[in-house]
Amino acid sequence: MITVDDANPTPPYEQIRSQLASLINAGSLAFGERLPTVRQLAADLRLAPGTVARAYTELEAQGLIESKRGAGTRVSAHVEAAPMLGETAAFVTAARATGLDLEAAIVAVRAAWT
Amino acid sequence: MFGLLSLSLVVLGGVVVVLIALRSRSRGDIPAPIIEPRFAVDVAAQVQRTRGRLTLALVLFVAIGFVATLDPMGLQPRSWLGLGNALGLAVAAIIAGLVLAASPIVSWPRAEGVRTADLVPRSGGSFGPRWGFALPLASAGILILFLLVTGLTSVPDDLGLYRAFTVEIVGGSSTASPYPGWFYGVPVIAATLVLAGVVLLVLNRVAAAPRPANPDLYPVDDALRRSVTRFIMLLSSSALLAYFGGVAAIAGNATSNTASQWTESPDWQVSSEGVVLAGDYLPLYLQPTYAIGIVESIVGIALLALAIVLLVFAAATSTLRWATVVAESETIAA
């Protein structure tokens, strides 16, 4: 599920691109999974098809999705972090329990990384 | 071959009826969605709009089908030789389908601000069980095959039109007409293909309609789309089985007529008074042609009965029965 907010200063195509990229990177959209057509997504979000097409084009350029004539648009990226998703979820739960927000949690990860 | 084809269609139709009846009894096909009272006005408006469209399509189908098939006012020229009657139900179903497809079948109010979309691709087959599409498609295939067989076995009549059936008998031949040869078969096949295209168009329109902006309305949206899908499949299947039933009955009548011969010998009957004269001519039935004709006629009548049952199911679907349950729950919640 993705949303587009008119009040958000980020352009609609970027809102779509970033949400789809996050879902793919998080493994919520699996490799090979079909995405809705440009027309369907544009109709549901009440946007011009060109807006959704632009988001899809950028995701394709990033190597996250692949469009083929007749086969539709599919997720083409293998999520490298997939084996770590369980541990990451446990870390996020623990971070939330101690009152950390996303920025603070990222700082903690960065500190541990170095 | 004739009997086998038409019999297989009766079996298919019977399977459809039984499956629909079982699923309707379990109420598992279109369950009443739970909605919040704040959406009551939007849902009521949408339900009313969809119900109106389905009712209009149903009324058009019945009215056009009745007038075109039975021609109670005798408007069709004699030169058509019953072609209008043969095509009436297909044309009625095509018009009903086009009326449904003419404008967005499900149309929720335009929303500003935050809009949501799910990422599940939708297609024409997303809102019905697979068998609900496969069985009518198979029925259309059997009908076309049947018409190809009747076309190949037809012969030209006095006007040179392929609408007669003939069998060789001792000392000559026996011919009967009308028979669903190429004269009727080609237009009926074309109408069936157009009907299939219109059904596909409606299904695609159902899938392509935008989702409501608020995901809380998705269950109602799903129920509406499932209802329209079910309605168009039932209506088109009803039309298909009805005109196939007519074609099979007419083929059966012609086939059995050609196989019924009257000999020069008198017909005798054994009764309590002894052997008495039952008729001036002894009937002779050529087998298996006569039996095939009788089977076709019976199958034709069975198909017509199945078509009526499917039409009743379509009418029941157009009432959106689940929506009444929703309205009741809204009243309780309010």
Image (spheres, rainbow, N blue to C red):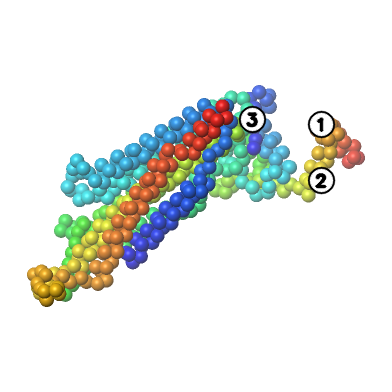
For residue A48, above or below residue B229: above
Q: Residue at x 51, y 33 (%)?
A: B328
Tell me the amino acid under the disc marked 3: Val
The kind of secondary structure element at disc 3 is strand
Quarter of the image for the N terminus of chain B: give it. bottom left
Residue denoted by label 2:
A87
Share a chain, discs 3 and 2? yes
Please state which of residues B297 and A110 is positioned toward the viewer in this rendering: B297
Locate residue B149, reporting x and y percent: 31, 62
Residue denoted by label 1:
A101
For residue A31, above or below residue B258: above
Is residue A52 visible to us here?
A: no
Tell me the amino acid under the disc marked 2: Glu
| A31 relative position to B186: left or right | right
Give the letter of the chain under mark 2.
Answer: A
Tell me the amino acid under the disc marked 1: Asp
Give the letter of the chain under mark 3.
Answer: A
